[in-house]
Image (cartoon, rainbow, N blue to C red):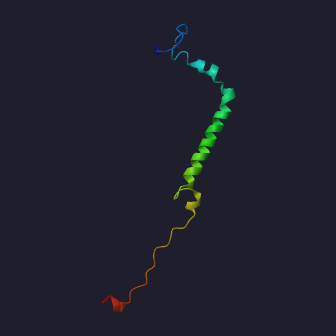
Amino acid sequence: MQVPVMFADPSVAAPNHPEEDWKIWTVINPATWMVPFFGILFVQMWMIHSYALALPGYGFKDSVRVAAPAAVVAPVAATQAQ
């Protein structure tokens, strides 16, 4: 499949996808960029989870709270019920 390519220089050959997809690894070296990439993902994950667990009704601090007891109403005297 030929993908239309808009290069400023017509002497640059159009890439032949997907046969030449491996060439991305000549630009992005995983041995160099994998650790910083996963570091950024970890920080992003940490920030999102910190925010989500801080919302009211979510998180660990809300899970240990005991539900408020039901309202206790004094029984009605038998003479008042008639």
Pick out the residue farthest to the right.
32
| 64 w.r.t. 6: above or below | below
| 13 w.r.t. 52: above or below | above
Pick out the residue farthest to the front.
8
Q: Position of residue 14 (x, y in %)?
A: 52, 12
Quarter of the rendering occupied by the C terminus: bottom left
Tell me what residue is drawn at x 41 percent, y 85 percent. 75
Q: Quadrant of residue 66?
A: bottom right
Pick out the residue farthest to the left.
82
Tell me what residue is drawn at x 49 percent, y 73 percent. 69
Q: Position of residue 63 (x, y in %)?
A: 55, 61
Q: Quadrant of residue 44?
A: top right
Q: Position of residue 30 (x, y in %)?
A: 65, 27
Tell me what residue is drawn at x 36 percent, y 90 percent. 78
Pick out the residue farthest to the top.
11
| 62 w.r.t. 20: above or below | below
Taking 7 as reference, is 73 left or right? left
